[in-house]
Each structure stands twice: as C-alpha cells, then as structure tokens.
Image (spheres, rainbow, N blue to C red):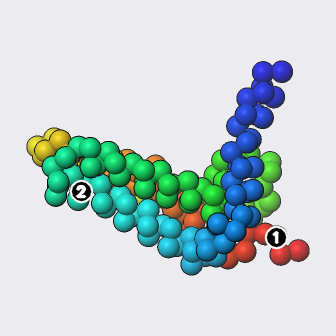
Amino acid sequence: MTTMKVTHQAAWWPGACRKLHDSRMMAPFRSRAGRRRLVGLYLMVLVALPVAGWLTDQVWVTALLFIPYAVVTLLLAIATEGLLNRPLGSLDERQVNLRRSLFREPYGAGVGLGLAGGLVVAVATLADEALMMGLVIAVLGLLFGLPLMMLAWRMPANPVDDE
C-alpha cells in the first residue's frame, strides 16, 4: 500500500510537465530550436551567478539570481515533458535509449567538470563571499543540469511517436 502511494506521489510531476508542455505558453519551446534557446538561457543564468557576485560584491544579488535559475530549470523540465522523471516502463524504446545515453555521456564529461569545479571552489575560497557563492552555485548547477540540458539539446523535433 505504501509503495503505491509513493509511486503515485512521484508520478504527478511528469504528468504535470506533459500537461503544461501542451499549453500555449510553451509553444515557443516545443521545437528543437526553442529547447536549444532554453539551454543557452540556462547557461547564461549560470554565467551570471559568479559575474553578478564579482561585480556587485553583494550576496543578496547572487541569491536573487536563484529566481531566473529556478524558472529556466522548470521551463527545461516542461519542454522535455519530464522525460528524466518518468518511470522507464512508461517510455517507448526510443525514449529509453535517449534517456540512457544521457547518463552515460554527460557524466563522463561531468567528472572532468567536477574536477574543474573543484579548482573553481578552491579559487572561490580565496574570493569574496558573493563571488564564491556564485561560482559554487554555477558549478553545481552545471553538474546537476547537464542531463536535462543534454536531453533538451538532443530531443527530436517531434517527440511524439511517428506511427
């Protein structure tokens, strides 16, 4: 009984993503080009985190950038129809292959990024608080957002079955 409840609670997010994906608001992001623009926007927000901390030297400015970070992350999840959060049983063969490739390839690069992130954190400990916070958040956002960005970049133009 408890297992069904947990499964049901976890299943609401992919369903909400699919429903929101079909809304008029998401029309510009249904295409491959639209999703790629979202990936670019996500990367720009990540770059803005340390830059804002460096330029303003104010922690609250860096913390304020969490709002666009959260919005772009949600838009990416909705644009990809919550594919990363869906159970494997609900995906077709093509979607399963796409999802599995996301976790093989990006995390090979993620190890390198993690090492580079470690260097960034080491440098950030010598920097001001706002710059340090921006660098750490940007590196973590890049590492955790890598599968979602790769999915949005690679997802076919029409994710609906061609049958």
Q: In which quarter of the image is residue 125?
A: top left
Element under label 1? loop
Amino acid residing under circle 2: Ala
Q: x, y (%) of residue 28?
A: 61, 74
Q: x, y (%) of residue 23?
A: 72, 64
Q: Earlier in the sequence, mark 1 or mark 2?
A: 2
Query: Farthest right residue?
Result: 163
Amino acid residing under circle 1: Asp
Q: x, y (%) of residue 19?
A: 75, 56
Q: Which of 64 and 155 is in front in this view?
A: 64
Q: x, y (%) of residue 93?
A: 78, 61
Q: Residue 12 bears which disc, if any?
A: none
Q: Mark 1 points at which residue?
A: 161
Element under label 2? helix
**How many residues crowd around disc 1 within 10 Å: few (fewer than 14), some, or many (20 or more)?**
few
- Residue at 43% x, 56% y is 68
**How many residues crowd around disc 2 within 10 Å: few (fewer than 14), some, or many (20 or more)?**
many
Q: Nearer the viewer, residue 107 or 72?
A: 72
Q: What quarter of the picture does the N terminus occupy?
A: top right
Q: Mark 2 points at which residue?
A: 52
Tell me if residue 18 can be seen. Answer: yes
Q: Are marks 1 and 2 in contact (CB under 8 Å)?
A: no
Q: Is residue 154 left or right of 8 when viewed as pictured?
A: left
- Residue at 70% x, 68% y is 24
Q: Is residue 29 left or right of 62 when viewed as pictured?
A: right
Tell me if residue 97 can be seen. Answer: no
- Residue at 71% x, 50% y is 16
